[in-house]
Image (tube, grey):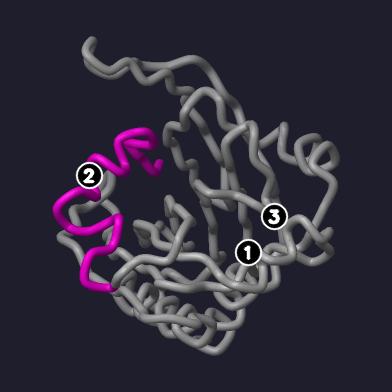
Amino acid sequence: MLSRITFALFSSIILLVSQPLAAVADKASAEVTAANAAKAPSNQTIHQSSQQLVIFEQTINFNLPSDWKLAHSEQQETMFSAEFVPANQELQTWSSMVCVQGFKGVAADIEPELFLETMANVYLENCQGEMVFETLPSEPLNGHETASAIIGCTKMPNSHIKSIDKTTAYEANHGLGEIGHYTAVKGKADLYLIHKSIRGDSFSKANPPVKSQNYQEFLSSITPLSLH
């Protein structure tokens, strides 16, 4: 079972399928609903849209900045993935991303903490720089067990690029710093992963852009989360 989970994680990190955005959006339109939602404090207004994804047997609710879009969605027999990026970016060249995934029927076989550790090990295999892995305090999500961590790499290849022109070839080859906040949620039968990541210039492992001191602010544009 663990080998199947590892393969699914490897596929989701490294072997994402390149699909036309219009076709992906049509496929996911029945699963993704968006509506204008709450605003942040008056001194800094952030427009958000509420999102709802029905993944296997349960529904995940979260927020996105209102100017983001669905860039890729894939439904397999045992795995679901949806990736969102700013409206002016594409999946191949993103600098910010939110990804929601579901892994069917594995909740009884792996704990959220071990799931994130397994993911970090897969991540490490593809990191060309130094690895960042920091576990964080976690609380139940609507009664469901969770685990959270910051996972990153000071220099990571762009795994989303399959065919690129000369203008993006340099970016793909020299690698970029990549880091994100990951939350694994143990559902009734399935396991879910929600993460927000950023990518840009290489950074120092000693001073990553996302860390325990600022991760809550980093997540403020997509929270609160819920699973029902």
Tell me whether circle 2 and circle 1 mark residues in contact (CB < 8 Å): no
Residue 216 marker = 2
Return the x and y of residue 211 as percentages of the image width and height. Answer: 22, 58
Observer-side mark, 2 or 3, equals: 3
Tell which circle, 2 or 1, labels the residue nearer the N-terminal end.
1
110 vs 12, left or right, is: left
Residue 224, quarter of the rendered image: top left
- Name the residue tied to disc 1: 79
Specify whether residue 219 is painted magenta.
yes
Kind of residue sitting beneath label 1 = Met
Q: Residue at 40% across / 41% down in the picture? A: 228
The kind of residue on which mark 3 rests is Gln
Q: Is residue 200 left or right of residue 81?
A: left
For the image shown, how many numbered marks are present on the structure? 3
Q: CA distance from mark 3 to mark 1?
A: 21 Å
Q: Which mark is residue 168?
A: none
Q: Nearer the viewer, residue 191 or 173?
A: 173
Q: Which residues are magenta?
A: 205-228
Reply above or below: 84 against 126. Answer: above
Q: Residue at x 17, y 58 (%)?
A: 212
